[in-house]
Image (cartoon, rainbow, N blue to C red):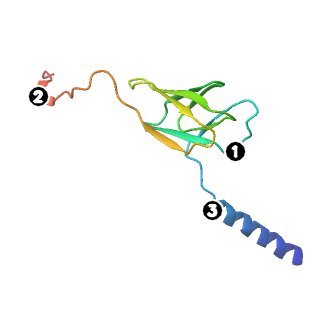
Amino acid sequence: MIVRTVTVATALTLLAACETAPLPPEGLSYARGRGAPEGAGTIIATSPDGAVLTHPEGLCRTPCQVNYLEKVQVTLAKEGYALVTINIPVGARDASFELTPVGRSTAVEEVSLPEL
């Protein structure tokens, strides 16, 4: 009976710890430099989501957790949006970038369309 009580108490403690820990963004991918430990890093997000983040070791999609042992330069690219290049120092805070649309931006009004 004592073993069961301890097991239930341990399970409840673990559940409580899970509920208080911050959850990573949905769909989080990872960019890790050689020798960098798993875990803490800087989360880079974009609006809209799904930009390709190019880092020295490869590619990931935003939101992406970048974890390097030194400052790293990355680029954010998404079709229809201007390319963004950023430098991420070690220990940087999480950041979100609003991507700027490029190309045609004039709205097409309904009255300008031909009747079908």
Residue occupying image coordinates x 67% and y 45%: 40
Nearer to us of marks 1 and 2 is: 1
Residue 9 percent coordinates (x, y)? 77, 72
Q: Is residue 5 left or right of residue 73?
A: right
Q: Are marks 1 and 2 in contact (CB under 8 Å)?
A: no
Camera-nearest residue between 33 and 111: 33
Q: Which residue is mark 2?
A: 111
Mark 2 neighbour density, 10 Å: few (under 14) some (14–19) many (20 or more): few
Q: Where residue 65 is drawn, which disc sits there? A: none
Q: Which residue is mark 3?
A: 19
Q: Are marks 3 and 2 in contact (CB under 8 Å)?
A: no
The answer to whether one can see residue 1 in this image is no
Q: Earlier in the sequence, mark 1 or mark 2?
A: 1
Camera-nearest residue between 48 and 66: 66
The answer to whether one can see residue 95 in this image is yes
Residue 75 percent coordinates (x, y)? 52, 26
Q: Is residue 53 left or right of residue 67?
A: left
Q: Which residue is mark 1?
A: 39
For numbered disc 3, what is the local secondary structure?
helix
